[in-house]
Amino acid sequence: MHGSRIPIWFFIGVLLLVYGLMIFGYGVYEWQTANYPPLVQLTNLHTPVWWGGVLALLGLLYVVKFRPTRAHK
């Protein structure tokens, strides 16, 4: 079993991907059901959509780069 270890960065990528998708989904929901006039001044920037997308892309990058592979002997 010494050649089949999964890097910790793969799991970090999975977490970033899941959290990013959750935040992105919430941001899209918030954008669609927004109350106008907004309660916060910069609501029109839709930061959960941006940050959720950035986290999801970063997580996807980590998942692809550090995905576990099978070593052939």
Image (cartoon, rainbow, N blue to C red):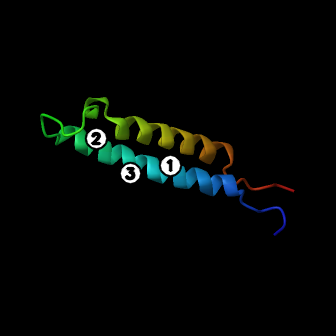
Question: For this view, does 33 lie left or right of residue 2?
Answer: left
Count of residue discs:
3
Residue for point 76% across, 62% down: 5
User: Relative to 44, is 19 above or below?
Assistant: below
* Element type at mark 1: helix
Q: Which mark is residue 22?
A: 3
Q: On screen, 3 above or below 50?
A: below
The spot of residue 59 in percent (x, y) is 55, 45
Q: Determine which residue is flagged by label 1.
A: 17
Q: Residues within 10 Å of mark 2 (few under 14, many from 20)?
A: some
Q: Position of residue 48 (x, y in %)?
A: 36, 41
Report which residue position mark 2 lands on: 28
Q: CA distance from mark 2 to mark 3?
A: 10 Å
**Disc on the earlier residue, 2 or 3:** 3
Please report the residue visible at 55 percent of the width from the left and 54 percent of the height from the top: 14
Residue in the picture at 53% in, 50% down:
16
Give the Cα separation between the discs numbered 2 and 1.
16 Å
The disc labelled 2 sits on which kind of residue?
A: Val
